[in-house]
Image (cartoon, rainbow, N blue to C red):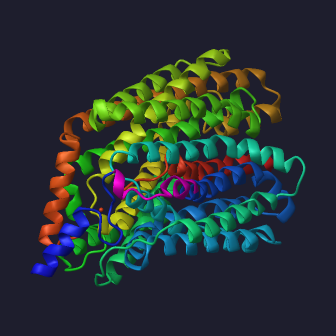
Amino acid sequence: MKQRTDQQVARRTGQGEGGRESGREGRHPRRWLILIVLCLSTLVLVIDNMVLTVAIPTIAEDLGASSQDLQWILDSYMLVFAGLLLTAGSLSDRYGRRRTMIVGLALFGAASLVAMEATSPEALILGRVLMGVGGALIMPSTLSILITVFDEDERPKAIAAWSAVAMVGLVGGPVLGGALLAHFWWGVVFLINIPIAVLAIAAALVLMPESKGPWRKADPLGMVLSMVGMTALIWTIVELPKGGLGEPGTQVSLAVTLLSLVGFAVWETRTASPMVPVSLFRNRVFTGASFSLVLLTLANGGLMLVLTQYLQFVLGYSATETGLAFTPAAVATLVFNGVGASLLPRTGNRVMAATGLLVIAAGFALLSTLSTDTGWGVLAGAMCLMGAGSGLAMPAAMAAMMGAIPDEHAGVGSALNDTVQQAGAALGVAVLGAVLSTTFTANMPTDAPAAARHSIGDALATATTTGDTSLLAAAYDAFTAAMSASFLTGAAGVVGAAVLAMLLMRGGKTAAAAGTAKETDAGADAGTATAPGAAATEVRTSSEAERLVGAHH
């Protein structure tokens, strides 16, 4: 009993293995250098997927890839990544977070080499699958390491920098991809991953301390159920807009999703050594922050899908120009990440998160006013509002969530939130995509060709083939009406997230500390966040595959 009490005290005061350091004298001397390594590790994932989107038409031509091949090139990464997140987080707590991240970086770099040298679609798909495994090992480890090396006072600033880097990658990826593809072959989009991975591995070995949770019995059944359930969930969400629930394949995947995830939840509440601390959701701060982020990523996932089509199909932007159009959001995020981090000690997480979410809702409302002849100013203003809101809300919500997670479960806690946000972004594409498609069809003329009534891409292809200028004008008008409905739906979701934040994220630090102490004293298992934009990135690239392939073929 005495030994157990000493271990509990050590964990709470930040002196145990992997414990969070508290107080200025306990701060890690190389923590800001470690943050750079964590940012590099996150950046390589975000940039790779954004650059790949730009390279899809070139890959299709060079490898002779079919539409189905290209869909698998994009979807294979996302399916593996989402399916393995929880298991990877659990492994990082068990075997070491630095070690897990280094293994993930090495695998991601090696898989990038496989993809770069691919001479067939099948070889490229294999490379993408292996990259998904590496990405799943990297992502939970980065934030869990951040938790252990930064104390509560400095953590908001660290999270702000970490999330800002992800936003830079999200916006800069297409611009970088366009510049590289103008001078090199498509394999360069994978080549750039290798030196970044090597640099991050070397820096991690030199700078970063190892941290892990206390030894616990493995939960193999929980791992299998989570992998099957999350993979089936993402597959269902991706396939649902194509044929609806009437498709037998979608029905089967939905049934597998429900059986696996319900079985996982039941098993985790009954097993003596659960992989995921389900009891953590009894902490209202964690729950409020989690579901607020779910609704935010749901809205942002749909934003990327809808706005990208507006910029490219209606305004005629190239992929590089589309990336540049998001620059005001990136700049605003960078600025307001710093502003939010400095104001957070005065306002608290709850007020800051809710304020940021309402600013994002205002951005969605402004986007809903876009039309075929709207000037650049409205779009830039909306992007600034979106970026400012994200800069205020994301660090606050993540800080609240991380404060509720016991140190020994930092890895699986981070993976849990990564997984929830991944599902939220995929669901956002499905929900806002369905609103967009349904409203577009309803606003198209009844005498328009059937092939032109499904999407803006199909309508433009039909109008180009037939030379029907009136069909082209009708398609533009129908799409802007549908886009407006989608953005208003997104605004409603973000307002809902703000309400949840205000109702549930009360008590912040106190509630989190109490929850942590209770979990530790009881010997129970308890666990946090994803780089904003990272989840949405994967779903966005998958959803864009069909229209990019359609443009190529």
Query: Which residue in the rendered view is the most extreme toward the right?
Result: 183
Q: Position of residue 74 (x, y in %)?
A: 64, 59
- Visible in this render: residue 152? yes
Magenta region includes residue 325? no
Q: Which is more toward the observer, 527 or 421?
A: 527
Residue at 66 percent across and 29 percent down: it is 448
Residue at 42 percent across and 68 percent down: it is 252
Would you say 508 lies left or right of 233 here?
left
Q: Quadrant of the N terminus?
A: bottom left
Would you say 280 lies left or right of 88 here?
left
Q: Position of residue 246 (x, y in %)?
A: 45, 56
Main SS, magenta region, reads helix
Q: Which is more toward the observer, 38 or 321?
A: 38
Q: Quadrant of residue 414?
A: bottom left
Q: Is residue 53 above or below residue 41?
A: above
Would you say 154 lies left or right of 405 here?
right
Segment tinted magenta in the rendering:
24-36
Q: Position of residue 85 (x, y in %)?
A: 45, 66
Q: Quadrant of residue 353?
A: top left
